[in-house]
Amino acid sequence: MRHIISILIENESGALSRVAGLFSARGYNIESLTVAATEDPSLSRMTLVTRGSDDIIEQITKQLNKLIDVVKLIDLADSDHIERELMMVKIRTTEQTREEIRSLAAIFRGKIIDVTPTTYVVEMTGPSSKLDAFIAAIDGDTIIEVVRSGPTGISRGEKGLHL
Amino acid sequence: MELNGAQIVIQSLKDEGVEYIFGYPGGAVLHLYDAIFQQDDVKHILVRHEQGATHAADGYARATGKPGVVLVTSGPGATNAVTGIATAYMDSIPMVIISGQVPSPVIGSDAFQEVDMVGITRPCVKHNFLVKDVTKLAETIKKAFYVATTGRPGPVVVDVPKDITDPRIKVPYKYPKKVSMRSYNPAVTGHKGQIKKAVDLLLTAKQPIIYAGGGVILGEASKELTEFAHTLGFPITNTLMGLGAYPATDKQFVGMLGMHGTYEANMAMHDSDVIIAIGARFDDRVTGKLDEFCPNAQIIHIDVDPASISKTVKVAIPIVGEVKPVLEQMMELIRESKKKPSKKALESWWKQIDQWRAVNCMEYDRNSRLIKPQYVIEQLYEVTKGEAYVTSDVGQHQMWAAQYYPFDKPRHWINSGGLGTMGFGLPAAIGVKLAFPDSEVACVTSDGSIQMCIQELSTALQYNAPVKIINLNNSYLGMVRQWQEFTYESRYSHSYMDTIPDFVKLAEAYGHVGMRIDKPEDVRPALEEAFAMKDRTVFLDILTDRTENVYPMIESGKAHNDMTLRVADGTSTDRELA
């Protein structure tokens, strides 16, 4: 099953490689990994998407917790949560296709953020599945480039990952 | 007090109570060595290879329970230390390794003797630090000792760039008494509810067994374990790392378990209904085939490291905490409980175990004209009255030492269990001897392993660490040969050495005493003579039966109840399935 693990980690050099190294050393897979500083500059927040049986996910969270730099983590799949991913897609356009891409982007609540005579860049956020659906809806031959941030997530309600 | 970085490192070690540093100088640590030169409190042991430094510090740590300290230079000094760091990591041994690094401004420029030590050691340390600011140096060293010695212990590397130890830059020094880290809070006591459940299960068990590992030794809980086992009257087995945690000569002890464990220990595990695993981690050499591991057992597991619980074997009742307080908590409940273990059930369980014991799985040919390695270990046990510290290398001799030298006390059996590092034994013995100069220290080794760190014979002489080297010389890499015999139709691919050095001359060249023994009747007198030479390192080159195998054995991929036993006629190369 797919799990989104959200980690608060000391903002020290090498912290990212400790996490990445753990996954490669123990043969766990990482689908995506995002890192950024938090409102507390001494902490970074990582969001990691992985897949595995319950036993493997249990080991992953235990091993992550064992890393000295990891302060706290939650598995978002354990509770109700919101997941968002940012995507930018550069699409080759012609006179004939521009209108269709614009309306498709509108349906998916995307924005066109760059325009040249021959291209559009569409910005879109949402759950990863929605972004997948947009990609599937446009003609694959017209896609020049797709950039995705990887998902991040936050739990609903009062519950949260903080110190 | 104002000190420079080099002085801060040495003063911090002194304030930490460090007795010995095992190390080797080089460019990046010259400032540190100059600071060492100007003091006498912390003694430096100059090894002959950085691997020797790590194993010596490791041996010191295993024997004393105090963290071992290593100092190496950058680049090759650091990489040479990696095998020893990984060895300590796999066996959870507290060590602090200070490695020199090229000056901060040139890090990343492929400078002379530069290597990314923090990167290289990341997978084989509990934690590591790169010091970037001399004002944080003392605090970082304190953190290193704190992390290395608490929770599940392990090695911690502190990588120190040369400019940090610059003698011209002085800063105020104060060694912190305590450090706390918001991201690191290892559990101490166990969860009360879980302990209650565990005790309830134990008191209803009919065929229970205690499976105790190295965590009992690391957690200084041998006394508590012994009391626990005696109170319940359960059989107890130790892992290779746990030998000595429970007195091996006690009648409740059924021997070591696992690949070369006793028949009774493995059969009792297999047929048990309740297992309590204490500071043990279900290593593959212990479990054998996982799918058939102890099919009827409910398992309780006490471990300070939550990641060790249910990693390979799912357990019914996990208890996260240090072994000693958890056993104390359990004992309290057991004493209070009105329920007692069923006498009748235990009696019939012991009857069954005694039948397995009667198989006498450790018997070997005692009438051989050749020296049997098992006989040598038995004689070593008698000559040292079972009180020696025994270090070993890795292979057949390691198993024979584990099988035929019953350890009654913790911290006396010192071997590389997890990583299986050949070359460990001699430097480890030196570390032990420095810690306990009045105790006997024997290194059980073999012609293959001993050559991997033999240069440390020179260290033993320089620092007056007289150890006794018991070299079970069979001209083969014995364990490799045994596996090739069993699984590769005796195709002995590169497991034979036909140019073994003259170890007697070699020992003499290093300034020690060398003895060669090639007859069974000479073993005992030679050992007595060797141990009578209190102040000399003696190398006993003992020519043993080349074809001898380690029995019993659970061959790779088999279950506990599927052991290969030695055949009764004593021919060591024949075998059949039990």
Image (cartoon, coloured by chain):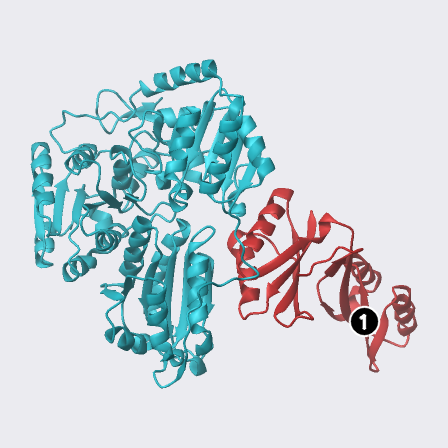
Give the drawing colour for chain B.
Answer: cyan
User: In the picture, residue A147 is in which quadrant?
Assistant: bottom right
> Tag 1's secondary structure?
strand
Mark 1 chain: A
Where does residue B459 sit, x and y in percent of width and height? 19, 60
Left/right of residue B209 with respect to residue B387 in the rendered view? right
- The residue pinned by badge 1 equals A123
Q: Is residue B40 above or below residue B382?
A: below
Quadrant where the C terminus of chain A sits is: bottom right
Report if residue B310 is visible in the image.
no
Given residues B429 and B115, the one toward you in this image is B429
Given residues B31 and A134, the one toward you in this image is B31
Where does residue B237 sit, x and y in percent of width and height? 38, 31
Where does residue B276 sit, x and y in percent of width and height? 48, 32
Given residues B513 and A1, the one toward you in this image is B513
Give the chain coloured red: A
Where does residue B384 sit, x and y in percent of width and height? 17, 38
Q: Is residue B65 above or below residue B205?
A: below
